């Protein structure tokens, strides 16, 4: 009897000790991410995302299309285009409209399945995210946008952010998460590129003072094997440098000083294993810049879950877009034989994937853009030892992606505009003059 009592109290003591200790953090080796999801359009891509069994899913913005887009109209009472335009093309929705749009997105069948599998794992939050302009509330909007605080609350409700979360009290939705056991941590830093952003063409700030201070602290504290920085807009590619004056995209490249500051911060923090993920542009690509820190910086862009450039034109013209994408010069895009198209861009709906093979030596990483049936359409394999300052692979000859788009010769850089204007000139001599004047 005494022996029995003793044994059971020992057992109890052991049980107690174990339950008092923090549960071990599960190892994370599969992360998926995506952006640009029209809530009222079918979203078949969730099947492929669920099949990938991501342990974490990251929203990179345009998680809903919250603003109202008026059609292009040259004539009539409400003209949205041309020099005689009298109403803006995009207008914000009311709070109720925003809420109901988020509801549609949240109850989407495929997305609900993803949220359910996420609850199976012991993680504080399995689906995380930041926003871009259309879910912030208005196309291309920045700090001047009036409804930003209301929309911040709605966005955090959508992500099931706890009511007492500090994220509900700060100005902007930036946040950071650390997953995984000691020594194999993955840190995810999500930036807010909207709430504090100065106007385009100002070369002002994207992040604002408080977020910069926070980011500096995040990059300098506690090590993590891998650090993923999520930015709604592209960090590396500066497509505008080669598509202007025809059209311009938002990107960190449009804020050169701010971008330089970001690279210096990463470099000064001496943090290894940092890379970016981004969305926004309605196509997928993987880019790389070798001269910002002591090792290659990658930016895996996936856009969008439903919104994609090829979807807006008839399929027999897709080859034209692919040709133009191939023709548009780039200095950062990774061109390899794993691409579905010669251009190494992908203009159909897609999602992004990060896989970590922790048991490999050195630990290896795979970045992919995947299409609706889960097939990889762009991919890059690298390893943690390559994402390390002073790595042996970074000899001068290996720095392939070091020049900026703006440093390309004029005729190369303006190739697209030249082609376009000569095409237009073929029809009318006046057309080309307008295009070049932009
Ligand atoms: C979203 O999808 C609906 C239905 O297909 C369409 O009417 C609407 O224009 C789309 N919105 C955007 C921003 O593409
Ligand atoms: C990106 O391109 C824009 C437009 O050509 C240019 O003003 C800007 O300086 C470029 N940024 C970088 C970092 O090259």
Image (tube, rainbow, N blue to C red):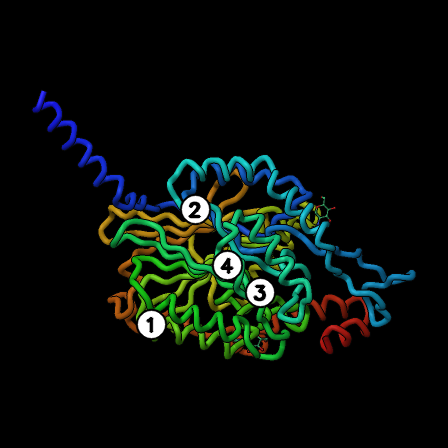
Position of residue 431 measured from the top left corner of the image (x, y, whole percent):
79, 71
Residue at (49, 36) in percent of width and height: 116
Q: CA distance from mark 3 to mark 1?
A: 34 Å
Position of residue 50 measured from the top left corner of the image (x, y, whole percent):
48, 37
Q: CA distance from mark 1 to mark 4?
A: 24 Å
Disc 3 or disc 2, which is closer to the eye?
A: 2
Tell me if mark 4 has few (under 14), some (14-19) or many (20+) residues whose alpha carbon lies within 10 angstroms of its own.
some
Q: CA distance from mark 4 to mark 2?
A: 19 Å
Q: Secondary structure at mark 2?
A: strand
Asked if marks 3 and 2 touch (Cβ < 8 Å), the reply is no
Q: Which residue is mark 1?
A: 269
Q: Nearer the viewer, residue 267 or 5?
A: 5
Q: Secondary structure at mark 3?
A: loop
Disc on the earlier residue, 1 or 2: 2
Tell me if mark 2 has few (under 14), some (14-19) or many (20+) residues whose alpha carbon lies within 10 angstroms of its own.
many
Q: Which residue is mark 3?
A: 328
Residue at (83, 72) in percent of width and height: 83
| Quarter of the image where the N terminus is located | top left
Position of residue 277 measured from the top left corner of the image (x, y, whole percent):
47, 58
Residue 204 is labelled as none
Q: CA distance from mark 3 to mark 2?
A: 34 Å
Residue 56 is labelled as 2
Residue at (51, 66) in percent of width and height: 237
Q: Secondary structure at mark 4?
A: helix
Q: Which residue is mark 4?
A: 167
Q: CA distance from mark 3 to mark 4?
A: 40 Å
Q: Is residue 322 visible?
A: no
| Quarter of the image where the C terminus is located | bottom right
Q: Nearer the viewer, residue 438 or 115?
A: 115
């Amino acid at each position: 009897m005494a022996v029995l009592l003793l044994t059971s109290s020992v057992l109890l003591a052991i049980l107690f000790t174990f339950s008092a200790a923090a549960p071990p953090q599960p190892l994370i080796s599969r992360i998926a991410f995506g952006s640009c999801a029209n809530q009222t359009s079918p979203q078949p891509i969730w099947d492929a995302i669920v099949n990938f069994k991501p342990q974490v899913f990251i929203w990179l913005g345009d998680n809903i299309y919250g603003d109202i887009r008026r059609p292009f109209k040259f004539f009539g009472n409400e003209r949205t285009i041309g020099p005689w335009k009298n109403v803006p093309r995009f207008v914000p929705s009311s709070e109720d409209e925003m809420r109901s749009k988020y509801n549609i997105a949240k109850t989407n069948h495929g997305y609900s399945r993803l949220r359910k599998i996420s609850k199976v794992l012991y993680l504080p939050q399995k689906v995380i995210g930041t926003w871009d302009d259309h879910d912030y509330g208005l196309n291309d909007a920045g700090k001047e946008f009036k409804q930003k605080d209301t929309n911040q609350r709605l966005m955090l409700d959508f992500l099931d952010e706890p009511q007492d979360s500090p994220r509900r009290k700060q100005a902007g939705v930036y946040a950071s998460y650390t997953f995984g056991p000691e020594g194999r941590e993955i840190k995810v830093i999500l930036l807010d590129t909207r709430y504090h952003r100065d106007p385009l063409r100002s070369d002002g700030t994207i992040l604002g003072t408080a977020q910069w201070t926070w980011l500096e602290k995040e990059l300098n504290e506690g090590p993590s094997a891998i650090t993923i920085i999520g930015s709604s807009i592209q960090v590396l590619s500066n497509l505008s440098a080669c598509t202007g004056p025809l059209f311009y995209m938002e990107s960190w490249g449009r804020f050169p000083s701010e971008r330089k500051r970001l690279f210096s911060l990463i470099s000064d923090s001496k943090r290894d294993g940092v890379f970016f993920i981004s969305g926004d542009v309605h196509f997928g690509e993987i880019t790389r810049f070798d001269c910002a820190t002591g090792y290659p910086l990658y930016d895996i862009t996936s856009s969008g879950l439903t919104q994609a450039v090829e979807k807006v034109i008839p399929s027999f013209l897709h080859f034209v877009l692919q040709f133009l994408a191939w023709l548009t010069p780039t200095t950062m895009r990774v061109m390899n034989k794993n691409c579905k198209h010669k251009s190494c861009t992908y203009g159909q709906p897609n999602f992004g994937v990060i896989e970590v093979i922790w048991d490999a030596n050195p630990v290896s990483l795979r970045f992919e853009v995947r299409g609706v049936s889960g097939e990889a359409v762009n991919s890059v394999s690298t390893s943690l030892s390559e994402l390390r300052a002073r790595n042996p692979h970074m000899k001068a000859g290996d720095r392939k992606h070091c020049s900026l788009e703006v440093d390309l010769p004029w005729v190369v850089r303006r190739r697209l505009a030249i082609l376009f204007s000569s095409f237009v000139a073929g029809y009318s001599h006046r057309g080309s003059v307008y295009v070049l004047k932009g």
